[in-house]
Amino acid sequence: LPSKLPDIQSSIFTVIGKWANEHKALNLSQGFPNFGADPKLLELVAEAMKAGYNQYAPMEGIYSLREVISEKIHALYGKSYDPDKEITLVAGATQGIFTAITAVVHKGDEVIVFKPAYDCYEPAITLNGGITVPLQMKGREYRIDWEEFRSAITEKTRLVIINSPHNPTGTVLSDNDMKELSAALSGTDVLVLSDEVYEHMVFDGEGQRSVSKYPGLAERSFAMASFGKTFHVTGWKMGYCVAPAYLMKEFRKVHEFNVYAINHPIQRALAQYLSEPKHYLNLSDFFQRKRDLFLEAIAPSRFSFTPSKGTYFQLLDYSGITDEGDVEFARRLIQEKGIASIPISVFNLGNLDQNQLRFCFAKTDDTLYKAAEILNAI
Ligand code: PMP
Ligand code: GLN
């Protein structure tokens, strides 16, 4: 059978997860918390199920949840999205991203992606006949080179994908970055897909720079959010997409025939839970504390690092330890030292970054101390 994705192998998350299980390694690889969600949220889901919200939800998501999302975005970013025409609930950001790409990318269109890049963008572009144009982010701070970006825009460019806070590097786009992006796209019909699943995990007092905050970008952007990340429930696969009506109209055409509608009782629960901002506004402080705890605990180690500015990931540079490739070193750490992490070369679209591993610090303090003990002894 001719494969539609001939270059795709098993996802690194599956591979590392399997190795980690086999060796019973401390697992800081795939990004998920090893602590539970707020019991109140779980109760709300149970209540919604018992109350009988167990049949199909409306295609675009229940109105009360879209309304709360609209209010939240207005309060945080000052932009009003119409719940009727500009907000759709999705079965996780991965599905939302696939849907947005499918809705706008035609055969032969170019899509600019900054690498390292989260692994779900390129296959979605390829499956839609698009051409991925990768641009390497520069230096250990992983900054975007805006001059290079401007010269990468051609008449075939349909879409640019941004991701801030950024997986796997933990960098965030600055106000200046957003203005550069806006200026570069002004006068073009290039669209933006902004992957903002870590919007509530931005550290050191920096706020999230959502595309929703920048009128020149909001008018051409899909913004994607994930409840899995925000409420410690990655297994729920729930999120939402916002976009101006002309884009959302096309998005919903794909969504309708892809998933039609998503989990109903959880939407009911989220509509109530999300109406209290304290449920997401504390998250940056919560994860910043974990980042600091982890980094202080590994200070004696031979790894070097630039502190993560957002997400729940920290890159550790091991060039002071070995010159092995990152997949090989990650495997050895699992097998010989009992700790699992993600080699970031797999996010690099073919261009190997040999000496960095990604560790997830969405873990109990106890797990983080245990991890530090192992890392300090390497
Ligand atoms: N984008 C990024 C950058 C991510 O790290 C993730 C995490 N899985 C996703 C999208 C997908 O989110 P979801 O689990 O809601 O599909
Ligand atoms: N986003 C998570 C990570 O980067 C999970 C990815 C996945 O399981 N596909 O680790």
Image (cartoon, rainbow, N blue to C red):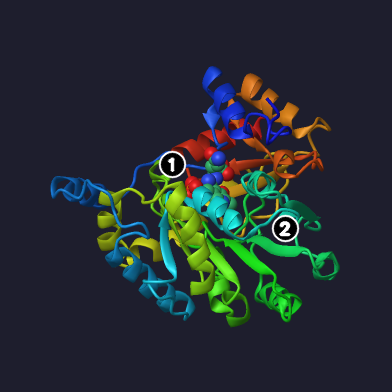
**x and y, in percent, of residue 230 in the image:** 43, 55
Tag nearer the camera, 1 or 2:
2
Instruction: Identify residue for label 1.
Output: 364
Query: Where is the N terminus found, in terms of image quarters?
Result: top right
Instruction: Identify residue for label 2.
Output: 111
Q: Is residue 362 above or below residue 187?
A: above
Q: Amino acid at mark 1?
A: Thr
Q: Residues within 10 Å of mark 2 (few under 14, many from 20)?
A: many
**x and y, in percent, of residue 258 in the image:** 46, 47
Under circle 2, the secondary element is strand
Under circle 1, the secondary element is loop
Q: Is residue 37 above or below residue 105?
A: above
In the depicted view, which residue is nearer to us: 119 or 296?
Answer: 119
Disc 1 to disc 2, C-alpha distance: 38 Å
Q: Is residue 330 visible?
A: yes
The residue lying at 80 percent from left, 69 percent from top is 146
